[in-house]
Image (cartoon, rainbow, N blue to C red):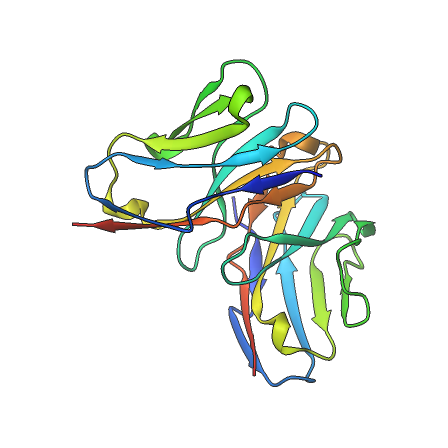
Amino acid sequence: AQSVTQPDIHITVSEGASLELRCNYSYGATPYLFWYVQSPGQGLQLLLKYFSGDTLVQGIKGFEAEFKRSQSSFNLRKPSVHWSDAAEYFCALTDSWGKLQFGAGTQVVVTP
Amino acid sequence: EAGVAQSPRYKIIEKRQSVAFWCNPISGHATLYWYQQILGQGPKLLIQFQNNGVVDDSQLPKDRFSAERLKGVDSTLKIQPAKLEDSAVYLCASRTQGSGKTNEKLFFGSGTQLSVL
């Protein structure tokens, strides 16, 4: 069965430091993978997506993610976080019918 | 362009009461979704509409949940009667027809936060 796992429930990072959020997936074929961000009181916003091709994808707000088939991972990174990056981040994949399946999310706290 | 509109923003009810949520998708978006997001979990799909028809309601607890999209535009999700475990954020999302697995142009509303006491 397909699944998305985000091992870290909560991450605290200092402003200006780098950030990496982990995502592991289980899927029978090449998945369509996504990262979404949810700020308090806001809807989910798409940061980036991977369908095929270059395994390093660039997204909005300075985020990037790398697809590693051998590790079944799609980790999200940002070189230098800003206080406005404090939010909850969700990794997701779509199945063959286009249904989005989300991970449990990682809450990011940014300290001064 | 205007986003996906949802109301109310918050709702507090007692168990066994009824509640309804409203969603107005982005103009022209044929596909509409309702998701349930329980605290500490990712959103879970409840129901998917294509225009005014149901495409997938396999995860909708049909004994208490119902949803409609009569004119293929806005949609209502109802819970009757509510249980404590229904406390969650209910998200509505919409996209243009045909974007399929890529979920291009999929947009989410801000959600309705439901507390069942």
Residue A23 lies, with reference to residue B17, above or below; the image says above
Residue B84: tell me if it is visible.
yes
Q: Residue furthest left?
A: A112
On the rendered structure, is A44 left or right of B72?
Answer: left
Determine whether, in the image, residue A46 is placed left or right of residue A51.
Answer: left
Q: Tell me where residue B100 sits by quadrant.
A: top right
Viewer-proximal residue among B27 and A30: A30
Residue B103 percent coordinates (x, y): 62, 35
Q: Quadrant of the N terminus of chain A?
A: top right
User: Which residue occupies 64% across, 41% down?
Assistant: A100
Q: Residue at x 71, y 36 (%)?
A: A98
The image position of residue B66, as x and y in percent, is 77, 66
Tell me where residue A22 sits by quadrant: top left
Q: Which of these two is toward me, B54 or B2?
A: B54
Left or right position of B67 against A102 = right
- As drawn, the residue found furthest toward the top would be A53
**Which residue occupies 64% across, 68% down?**
B21
Q: Position of residue B20 (x, y in %)?
A: 67, 72
Residue found at x 55% / y 49%: B108
Counting labels gives 0
Residue B99 appearing in the image = no
On screen, residue A71 above or below A14: above
* Residue B47 on image: x %, y %: 74, 54
- Height in image: A53 above or below B95? above
Viewer-proximal residue among B70 and B54: B54
Q: Is residue B83 above or below residue B41?
A: below
